[in-house]
Amino acid sequence: MIKKDNLYFPPEKFKKSAWINKKGIYQEAEKDPIKFWEKIAKEAYWKKPWNLAFEHKAPYFKWFLGGQINLAENCLDKNLEKKKDKIALIWEPEPVEEQPRIFTYKELLKEVNKAANALKKLGVKKGDRVGIYLPMIPEVIISMLACARIGAVHTVVFSAFSPQALKVRLQDTEARILITADGYFRRGQIINLKSNADEATKETKVEKVVVVKRTKNEVVWNPEINFWFEDLLKNEKEVCEPEAMDSEDLLFILYTSGSTGKPKGILHTCGGYTVQSKFTGKIIFDLHDNDIIWCTSDAGWITGHTYAIYSPLLNGATTVIFEGAPDWPTPERWAQIIEEHKVTIFYTAPTAIRMFEKYGAEIIKKYKFSTLRLLGSVGEPIDESAWNWYFAEVGKGKCPLVDTWWQTETGGILITSLPGIGPFKPSFTGLPLPGVKIDILDDEGKSCPVNKEGNLVILPPFTPGMLRGVYKNPEKYLETYWAKYGTNTYFTSDGAFRDEGGLVRIVGRVDDVLKVAGHRVSTGELENAAAKHPDIIESAVVGIPDEIKGEVPIIFAVSRKEKPEEELKKGIIDQIKKEIGPIALPKEVYIVEDLPKTRSGKIMRRILKRLFTGEELGDLSTLSNPEIVEKIKGKMQNLNGKNKS
Ligand code: WT7
């Protein structure tokens, strides 16, 4: 890489072979973004061309109206002519003694078609919602593509989510079919997923549960409603006509945390999502025929949907997925996977990068990573030191490092510098993509000057792959994204600023959402979970900085009864495991007498956070109970002292 001042640029050789290496594309897109996206859309295969590119009836918008398309057909059939025997998918199991499973494009198509036919036989029709609660095994991809092929709407739920979290999602979507597994391996243990699924499907509309045999552990079986995935596929035909989907037909629903307790079902549609995922993967990861991409995200998150699955397949590349934890059974597992599968593009989160760094440079020295040619980061701001380490030690100073900003709602990456152009600046995410119009606004709605922090917004015509709504909740859609600056301006809930060169730096969320190891968790969700504990009256959750995870929650809880604190703390943690799962466990629980509140009863989380970070507490006169702040402070110091000794 070429360094000029504090900026990096790609070397000539990389530039030369990159899909995009001339800045002209930015001007072209800016002149007429709708026309630009139309040109991009033509790179996908449409069963019927659209007759209107863009329609805006704020707060709603649509793309490629009248067009018909099928995502699975674009991922598989359309690659077959040239890529029949090319490897589409490499699956790395967690146990090291087990062999990887490898699928060519042709083999993957066959499996998808069989699964699609099997779903049809179970009664699944176009528009029906199908729940998918699977670990990172090939069947998660096969199931998603099978849904897309027949026009069923998939809702993938992260396998580490608790039964209760799954239940809420199944209830909201009213899915009648759930695809799950007997279990999966995690850090050497078998997790019994089927029993979670059984618990979750009570009080839902799920009528049939399809089970992939993965770990062969014993499961409770109800032959009337349980079906083995492999049995269903065994006698199915290997062909299945892809459904002609209207561009604006629903493709999938993916739940994400907002600032309230209830997760929101984000809606994505067929045409726009296909176009944007194909295009962004191509220009940002520079996906070529011989690329092997490993995006470490689970399929349960949007990053897994778009860059572990759909975008690599749409671009005819090879995708690597991994069942386990990147540091299991040894801290170098992730490095071994890169070497063994000759990964060329590695896309992960800052939390993983910081963990790799912590394990030490010794590991890194053993690996040359000679196949790597591009690195990516996503999910939370990457600090300068993690950026530099990743760039130097993993990329060996020769790979462009794209820090990609986006959200579940945007469907694909919207801000990052392009690998064949640059510039790359540590801790800055970069420039908005061609065809993406953003701004950074102050609270009055005025555009912020250079270096001034404000709120990141996205402006019309938005992008084809952005959300089309919140499932069954138009009020939430309006209120979350379009209330702050009016219905023509999408509010991202992220704070950001721009440098002199227009590069964007993301500062972090401005709402009550935490990013814990890159996962999005709302304080409201955690507080609701704690409130279900019979002895807890109320609680407040705040995020505090963490060396590895970026941010972690801590809870202040007020209890109804005098009970041993340890018992209460454990009870709260168990309650969170039950309601959400282990992804967002609090680092610390403080049992307190009361919470700092304004006279109108609003809990002042900001003050609690400052107690932790040591910042000035500010004006306490607006509180109805200012004396509580000192008490909480005393308690925290006490406990921290104890923990240290
Ligand atoms: C939030 C979205 C789709 C990406 C995976 C997470 C934060 C995401 C970056 C980045 C700084 C980032 C934002 C955003 N975020 N990427 N490169 N730099 N912050 O998707 O769970 O919907 O979370 O993640 O705060 O709003 P998500």
Image (cartoon, helix red, strand yellow):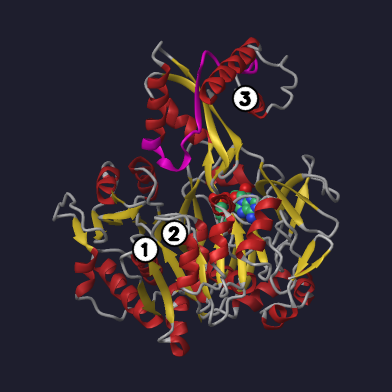
Which structural element holds mark 2?
A: loop
From what the image shows, is residue 577 above or below residue 67? above
Which structural element holds mark 1?
A: helix
In depth, the one of 431 and 493 nearer the eye is 431
Q: Quadrant of residue 287?
A: bottom right
Q: CA distance from mark 3 to mark 1?
A: 41 Å
Label at residue 569: none
Residue at x 42%, y 18% (from the top left corner): 565
Left or right of 612: which side holds 247? left
The magenta span reads: 577-600
In depth, the one of 349 and 384 nearer the eye is 384
| Residues packed near mark 2 inside 10 Å, few (<14), some (14 to 19) or many (20 plus) | many
List the residue tagged with mark 3: 608
List the residue tagged with mark 2: 299
Q: CA distance from mark 2 to mark 1?
A: 7 Å
Which structural element holds mark 3?
A: helix
Beta carbon at label 3 within 8 Å of ligand 1: no
Q: Nearer the viewer, mark 3 or mark 1?
A: 3
From what the image shows, is residue 531 above or below residue 559? below
| Residues packed near mark 3 inside 10 Å, few (<14), some (14 to 19) or many (20 plus) | many
* Amino acid carrying mark 1 in the image: Val
List the residue tagged with mark 1: 140
Given the current orientation, which residue lies at the most extreme bottom position?
Answer: 81
Q: Are marks 2 and 1 in contact (CB under 8 Å)?
A: yes
| Residues packed near mark 1 inside 10 Å, few (<14), some (14 to 19) or many (20 plus) | many
In primary-sequence order, the first of circles 3 and 1 is: 1
Left or right of 35: which side holds 378? left
Left or right of 397: which side holds 277? left
Q: Quadrant of the N terminus?
A: bottom right
In primary-sequence order, the first of circles 3 and 2 is: 2
Residue at x 51%, y 72% (from the top left corner): 343
Residue at x 15%, y 52% (from the top left corner): 222
